[in-house]
Image (cartoon, rainbow, N blue to C red):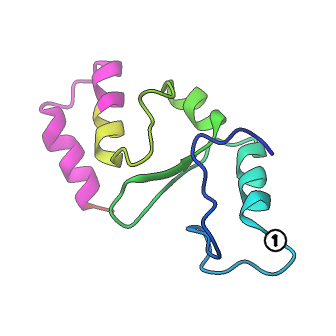
Amino acid sequence: MNDPLLNIEAPGRSPIMPSLPGEFSADHVTDLLCGAEAGLALFDRDLQLVFANGQYLELCGYSRHEVEPGVKLADLARLSLERVGTDVGDIDTTVNRGIERL
């Protein structure tokens, strides 16, 4: 199995799909997500990180320390805006407006 940032395996259930067909397991899903060429991040209903593959970290320039289980999408957006030194005005206001649109 690939080395996922987060382990999505849960006894009998997957946070990605309520139940997996018999031929699939949480390990299969994790391997597929980790092996994807695209950067992937999955967030729960509370917009907290559930899973991110290595390509996502590379694409966004995050370290494993910055992208830990449960980190909020708003915190990652704020970090990204601070790094690029954008001229969007108040970063917190910009992030909050973006999150409200989801």
For the C terminus, the quadrant is bottom left
Q: Amino acid at mark 1?
A: Phe
The residue lying at 77 percent from left, 68 percent from top is 25
For the N terminus, the quadrant is top right
The residue lying at 81 percent from left, 71 percent from top is 24
**Viewed as shown, does residue 88 lie left or right of 52?**
left
Q: Residues within 10 Å of mark 1 (few under 14, many from 20)?
A: few
Measured from the top left, where is residue 39 in percent x and y? 63, 41
> Which residue of the protein is positioned furthest toward the front in this rendering?
11
Task: Provide the residue designation for mark 1.
Answer: 24
Magenta: main secondary structure equals: helix
Q: Nearer the viewer, residue 99 or 15?
A: 15
The residue lying at 55 percent from left, 68 percent from top is 15
Measured from the top left, where is residue 78 in percent x and y? 28, 34
**Viewed as shown, does residue 76 lie left or right of 21?**
left
Element type at marker 1? loop
Please determine whether, in this image, residue 92 is positioned above or below residue 42. Answer: above
Residue 97 in the magenta stretch? The answer is yes
Q: Nearer the viewer, residue 95 or 22?
A: 22
Measured from the top left, where is residue 79 in percent x and y? 32, 29
**Viewed as shown, does residue 99 lie left or right of 14?**
left
Q: Report which quarter residue 18 is drawn in.
A: bottom right
The residue lying at 36 percent from left, 37 percent from top is 76
User: Magenta span covers which residues?
Assistant: 79-100
Q: Report which quarter residue 90 is drawn in.
A: top left
Residue 62 in the magenta stretch? The answer is no
Measured from the top left, where is residue 4 in percent x and y? 66, 42
